Amino acid sequence: MYGWIWRKLPGATTTARVVAASVLAAVTAAVLWYAAFPLLEPAVPLDEVTVRK
């Protein structure tokens, strides 16, 4: 899969592809952080911690 992404990235030089891959990773992280994780938060109650002895 990563090879396919690397071949599809624009740019003739390795530097351009590294920059494009970094931007792609940053955009993916931002979408997950600001869109996906807030939607999933009600289903994963991380604030409710139960300690059993």
Image (tube, rainbow, N blue to C red):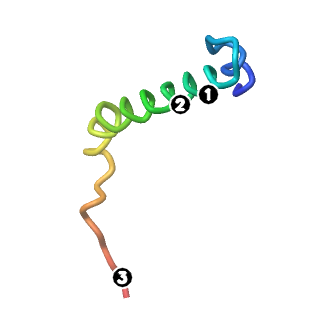
Q: Amino acid at mark 2?
A: Ser
Q: Amino acid at mark 1?
A: Val
Question: Please, what secondary structure does the residue beneath circle 2 have?
Answer: helix
Q: Which residue is mark 1?
A: 18
Q: Residue at x 25, y 45 (%)?
A: 42
* Mark 1 crowdedness (10 Å alpha carbons): few <14, some 14-19, many ≥20: some
- When asked about the image quadrant of residue 8, the answer is top right
**Left or right of residue 2: residue 32:** left
**Left or right of residue 30: residue 7:** right
Residue 4 is marked as none
Q: Position of residue 26 (x, y in %)?
A: 44, 32
Q: Nearer the viewer, mark 1 or mark 3?
A: 1
Residue 52 is marked as 3
Q: Position of residue 53 (x, y in %)?
A: 37, 88
Q: Which residue is mark 2?
A: 22
- When asked about the image quadrant of residue 1, the answer is top right
